[in-house]
Amino acid sequence: MTSKIQNPIPLPAIRRLPAYLRLLKAYKIEGETWVSATSLAQELRYKPIQVRKDMAWTGVEGKPKVGFNIDDLIFAIKFQLGWDNTTDAVLIGVGNLGKALVGYKGFENYGLKILSIHDTDPQKIGTKLGRLIIQPMNVLEDSIKRFGIHIAILTTPTEYVQGIAERLVTAGITGIWNFAPGKLKLPADIVIQRTDLATSFAELSSKIKNQIIK
Amino acid sequence: MTSKIQNPIPLPAIRRLPAYLRLLKAYKIEGETWVSATSLAQELRYKPIQVRKDMAWTGVEGKPKVGFNIDDLIFAIKFQLGWDNTTDAVLIGVGNLGKALVGYKGFENYGLKILSIHDTDPQKIGTKLGRLIIQPMNVLEDSIKRFGIHIAILTTPTEYVQGIAERLVTAGITGIWNFAPGKLKLPADIVIQRTDLATSFAELSSKIKNQIIK
DNA sequence: TAGATTGTTAATCGATTAACAATC
DNA sequence: TAGATTGTTAATCGATTAACAATC
C-alpha cells in the first residue's frame, strides 16, 4: 500500500481558518475545552458540514457528541497556516497603510513579525515608528540578509513596486505581500499575495448594485 | 419567447474586473482603441478563454480578429461594478488604516467618495484630514442622513464594531465595509464586505508553507 | 483570402452540500 | 440507552477550461 497522498487544503478553506482560530481563542478564554462543529458553524454562519470538512483538513479528530478539542484545533490551524513559528518580514513603504500594518496589534498573534521597515523619504528615515527605526532603501538587501527574512510587505506607490520586487527576489525573498494594484512579474517560485482595496470594494459595490436590481 | 434570464455575474469574475479596468485605462492612455482578450490575458497571466468569459459578463461584444472596444469595456465594467456614479461613504475610526483609506488616491477612480469621517478621540475631533474635518460619533446619524450616505467603512477597534454597525443600520446604511475581524450580526439585507488582513496573510503563509513542503 | 479572434457548447475540475452509518 | 455529533461517501453545484464553428 502506498502512503496516503495528502491533498493540498483548498484555498477557500485556508481563508476560513483565521476566523476559526479567532473564535477558538475566544472559547478558550471563556474556559471551554471542547467545541462542536455545529456551534462554530452557528457562530460564523457557515453550514455545520462545511465546518466539519474544514476541521478534517487540520487533521484533528473530533469525538461524536462531544466535538473537537479546542487546544488541538488551535495548534493544528496555526501549524497549517505556518503560524506556529513567527514569520519575519520586511516592510517597504511607510505611508499610512504601512504605518497601519506596522501598528496592527493582531499580527504577532498571527505569526507575523515585521523586523525592518524602509522608505525613500529623507524626512522619515531615521525616525522611529513604534520600536522600529525607518531605514533607507540602500540597506534593504543588508536588512534582509542580516535578519534572514523571507517575507516582504510592499506598501509603496504603484510605480515603484515592480523594481523593488525584483530587488527583493535577488536578495532572497520568497514571499511578497503586495498592496499595490497591478500584477508583479516575477519568477514562478515566488509566492505573491495581493491585497487590493479596489478588489474588495468591487465586491461590495457589485453586491449592493445587484441587491438594488433584485 | 420569455425574456432571457440574466444570471448574476460570479464572484470570482467580479474580483477580476478591477484588474481589467486598470489595464484598460492604461491602454487607453497609450492611445489604443481596441484590445483582444488574448493580450489582456497575457498581461494579467490569465487564460484567454477566461478573459473572454469575463468580457461576456459585461455584455460587450467583441469583433473577431480585432478584439473589444476599450471605451465600451471601461464603461461596461464600471457599470457592472456600480462605479459609474460615485458611491458616497462614511468612515468610522481614523486610525492609521482609516487615514490610509481616506488618503488612498485610487478610490475616486473606483467610484468611492468618503464624505464624512468620525472618531471618538477628542484629540482628533475637529482636526483636518485632507479636506475633511474629523467628526465626533454623536453626529454620525446626522452625517449619514444629511449626505444620504448608504455605505459605511469601519476601521475601528474590534470591540466597538458590532455596536457601531447596529447604529449604522438604524441610520439607513445598506452596505458595510468592515476591516475588523469577526462576523457582524446584522439583518440579512445588509451587504457586508469584510477585508481582513489576517485572512490575506493566512493565504500567503499557507502558500509559502506548502511550497516548502513540496 | 488566410488567419486571428470571438462566442458557444460541452467537458472537466474542484468545492460545497446531502445523506447516513459509526460512535461516544 | 438515546441522541447528538462525527466522518465518509456520493451528489450537486458552480467555475474554469477545452474544442470548435462563426466571422471579420
Image: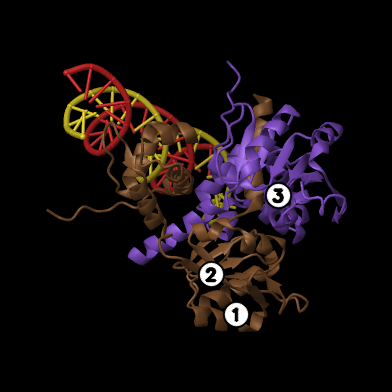
Chain colours: A brown, B purple, C yellow, D red
For residue A156, above or below residue B195: below
Q: Amino acid at mark 1?
A: Leu
Residue type at mark 3 is: Ile
- Taking the spot 21% from the left edge, 52% from the top edge, the residue there is A4
Helix or strand or loop: what does disc 3 sit on?
Answer: helix
* Marks 2, 1: nearer the viewer: 2
Which residue is depicted at the point 33% across and 47% down?
A: A57
> Residue D2: where, in percent of width, then height?
23, 16
Q: Secondary structure at mark 1?
A: helix
- Label 1 crowd (10 A; few <14 / some 14-19 / many >=20): many
Coordinates of residue B79 in the picture (x, y in percent): 71, 38
Pointer 2 with pointer 1, Cβ within 8 A: no
Q: Tell me the residue that label 3 is attached to.
A: B70
The relative height of residue D1 versus residue B148 in the rendered view (above or below) is above
Left or right of D1 on screen, residue B91: right
Which of the 4 image quarters holds residue B172? top right
Q: Earlier in the sequence, mark 2 or mark 1?
A: 2
List the single residue furthest toward the left: A1
For disc 2, the marked residue is: A89
- Classify the position of the N terminus of chain B by image quarter: top right
Q: Chain of mark 2?
A: A
How much space separates mark 1 and mark 3, taking CA atoms?
Answer: 40 Å
Asked if marks 1 and 3 touch (Cβ < 8 Å), the reply is no
- The residue identified by callout 1 is A140
**Left or right, residue B4 beside residue A208:** left
The answer to whether dots 3 and 2 both sit on one chain is no
Which residue is at the far front? A31
- Amino acid identity at mark 2: Ala
Q: Is residue B62 above or below residue B144?
A: below
Quadrant in which the C terminus of chain B is drawn: bottom left
Same chain for mark 2 and mark 1? The answer is yes
**Camera-nearest label, 3 or 2:** 2
